[in-house]
């Protein structure tokens, strides 16, 4: 460990020495800044201002640890993002010639104060920014903080070139929860690869690190399974309202996974079963277990479909589906749904969940499932996702399972903001922006403290939304609040502080044409 630190310090000192040889002719008078007054979301653990600035300009280069996996890509990501918001095209790991005056150095270290793999520290001075992290994921999170500190406008008076002044000081940061997720339902309405990528970009900016894809439901099957082709030649052709649906080929899915991975976001696939399965049983009626004739379905009612939980063919089907998808899913988790199985007898449901857990494990994955799965004999490495009754989570925790919290009345992005919201549903009530922010994961379920909580997730069900504009209207700004609750230490949760920082997201939201809801309780920057 010492040698890595020494190596980093040595390279860094060399760079500094190089810089000081090339003193600018005129000393720059940086204006007084205050790093502690900023719009960072999520709020970091510690911000120590030093009241001067780093002058991001055309003489700046990005330099990264080249022996550490993924660091150069993080540097390149930063260069690309700087190019999106300024005219600057910064070199990454290019040779340092006399035109270079300022350096952003991204380095791997094992000696941070915080021990999370996503921890990072940012040290911002006049001529150098040092971003240190234990892993490329940590460096990537630090880069999001840095992006949030770059001002919209350049200063054209203190230097001969335009400078984007980044307030100086030190930021020490790490996430509170390892799992900070967002879910998108692409079954009720299909979302294209481009639309999914757009959402991933937005989530990455707020340090979300899990993207749960709800790939199948009664209304449509959205992922190619080569051994069961009718799932997509038949099952993908419908969606809510009778429009044409769609699906991802396995190549599309890999493209989404790779795009997410570049943003250090893990994609968790969900195949919902034994209920929410009409699209599959319509494609292959042999799988049907509700004893009724099957037709395609484009409505919004839930709970009428079920697999036949006592048929070998059904388990062969599940083994094939999980096998093909697990093989192209780097995530350790595989979500099997398990919710709202009103057409499955309880004893059949329990038998089913136990068998499916074994199949998921055989494919090298940990099972993840909604509330209801804790009634089965689940193992301690299964992840329970709360959406409704808290007693199910208590039961899961007793079995040793970790909990992801997605309470319907707080984190469901598809609930309307208020009675005037055109999109969305109301079964869990209205969720105004302040309410989505004002809850605490560690005390949400009595008796289930932090040690039981893996993290939180904001699901977005798509019965009423069909495109990115609709998606963003429901997700933004509430998903930003969920991102802060997942990352920031609970002692720093504060609606008054948060709403001001949220109001200052307007330049980012506008620049990226994000169709956010203009909540009146937020002081939006005009
Ligand atoms: C759910 O909302 N049925 C998980």
Image (cartoon, rainbow, N blue to C red):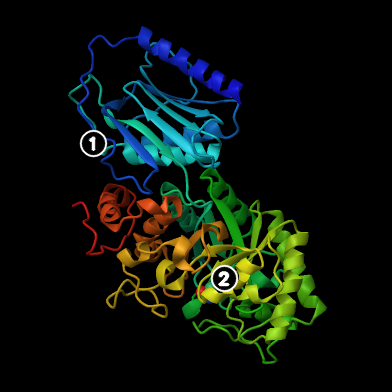
In the rendered view, would you say 201 is above or below 161?
below
Q: Is residue 387 left or right of residue 158?
A: right
Is 317 displayed left or right of 510 in the figure? right
Q: Give the label on residue 393, or none.
A: 2
Q: Position of residue 268 (x, y in %)?
A: 59, 58
Q: CA distance from mark 1 to mark 2?
A: 48 Å
Circle on res. 284? none
Badge 1 local density, few (<14 within 10 Å), some, or many (20+)? Answer: few
Q: Residue at x 46, y 61 (%)?
A: 441
**In terms of depth relative to the viewer, which is nearer, 442 or 283?**
442
Q: Looking at the image, which residue is at 49% across and 69% down?
A: 446
Q: Which mark is residue 153?
A: 1
Determine whether the beta carbon of the residue marked 1 sits less than 8 angstroms from the nearest atom of ligand 1: no
Q: Position of residue 154 (x, y in %)?
A: 24, 32
Farthest front residue in view? 447
At a point 78% along the width and 60% down the height, the residue shown is 362
Residue 151: % across, % down: 27, 37
Task: Determine if residue 191 is in view.
Answer: no
Report the residue at 52% width, 42% height from top. 118
Q: Return the disc, 1 or 2, that comes first in the chain's sequence.
A: 1
Q: Tell which residue pokes out farthest to the top in this image.
A: 21
For the N terminus, give its image quadrant.
top right
Q: Quadrant of residue 483?
A: bottom left
């Amino acid at each position: 460990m010492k040698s890595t630190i020494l190596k980093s310090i040595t390279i860094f000192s060399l760079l500094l020495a190089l810089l000081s040889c090339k003193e600018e002719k005129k000393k720059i008078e940086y204006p007084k800044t205050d790093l502690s007054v900023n719009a960072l979301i999520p709020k970091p653990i510690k911000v120590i201002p030093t009241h001067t600035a780093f002058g991001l300009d055309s003489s700046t280069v990005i330099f990264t640890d080249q022996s550490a996996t993924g660091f150069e890509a993080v540097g390149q990501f930063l260069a690309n993002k700087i190019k999106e918001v300024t005219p600057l095209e910064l070199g990454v790991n290019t040779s340092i010639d006399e035109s270079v005056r300022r350096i952003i150095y991204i380095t791997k270290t094992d000696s941070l104060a915080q021990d999370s793999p996503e921890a990072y520290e940012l040290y911002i001075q006049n001529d150098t920014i040092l971003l240190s992290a234990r892993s490329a994921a940590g460096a990537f999170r630090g880069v999001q903080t840095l992006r949030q500190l770059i001002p919209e406008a350049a200063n054209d008076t203190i230097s001969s070139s335009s400078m984007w002044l980044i307030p100086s000081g030190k930021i020490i940061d790490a996430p509170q929860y390892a799992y900070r997720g967002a879910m998108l339902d692409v079954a009720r309405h299909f979302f294209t690869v481009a639309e999914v990528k757009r959402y991933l970009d937005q989530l990455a900016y707020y340090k979300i690190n899990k993207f749960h894809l709800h790939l199948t439901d009664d209304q449509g099957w959205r992922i190619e399974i080569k051994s069961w082709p009718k799932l997509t030649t038949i099952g993908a052709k419908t969606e809510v309202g009778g429009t044409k649906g769609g699906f991802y080929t396995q190549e599309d899915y890999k493209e989404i996974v790779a795009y997410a991975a570049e943003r250090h976001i893990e994609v968790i696939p969900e195949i919902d079963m034994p209920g929410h399965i009409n699209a599959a049983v319509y494609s292959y009626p042999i799988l049907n277990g509700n004893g009724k004739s099957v037709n395609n379905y484009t409505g919004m009612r839930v709970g009428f479909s079920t697999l036949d939980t006592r048929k070998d063919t059904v388990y062969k089907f599940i083994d094939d589906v999980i096998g093909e998808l697990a093989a192209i899913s780097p995530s350790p988790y595989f979500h099997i749904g398990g919710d709202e199985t009103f057409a499955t007898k309880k004893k059949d449901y329990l038998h089913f969940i136990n068998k499916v857990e074994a199949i998921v494990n055989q494919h090298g994955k940990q099972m993840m499932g909604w509330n209801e799965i804790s009634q089965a004999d689940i193992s301690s490495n299964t992840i329970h996702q709360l959406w409704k009754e808290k007693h199910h989570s208590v039961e899961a925790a007793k079995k040793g399972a970790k909990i992801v919290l997605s309470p319907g009345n707080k984190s469901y992005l598809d609930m309307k903001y208020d009675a005037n919201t055109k999109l969305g549903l109301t079964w869990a009530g209205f969720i105004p922006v302040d309410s989505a922010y004002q809850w605490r994961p560690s005390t949400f379920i009595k008796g289930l403290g932090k040690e039981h909580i893996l993290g939180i997730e904001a699901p977005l069900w798509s019965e009423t939304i069909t495109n990115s504009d609709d998606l963003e209207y429901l997700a933004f700004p509430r998903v930003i609040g969920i991102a802060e609750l997942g990352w920031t230490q609970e002692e720093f949760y504060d609606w008054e502080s948060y709403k001001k920082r949220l109001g200052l997201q307007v330049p980012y939201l506008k620049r990226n044409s994000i169709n956010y809801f203009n909540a009146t309780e937020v002081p939006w920057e005009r």
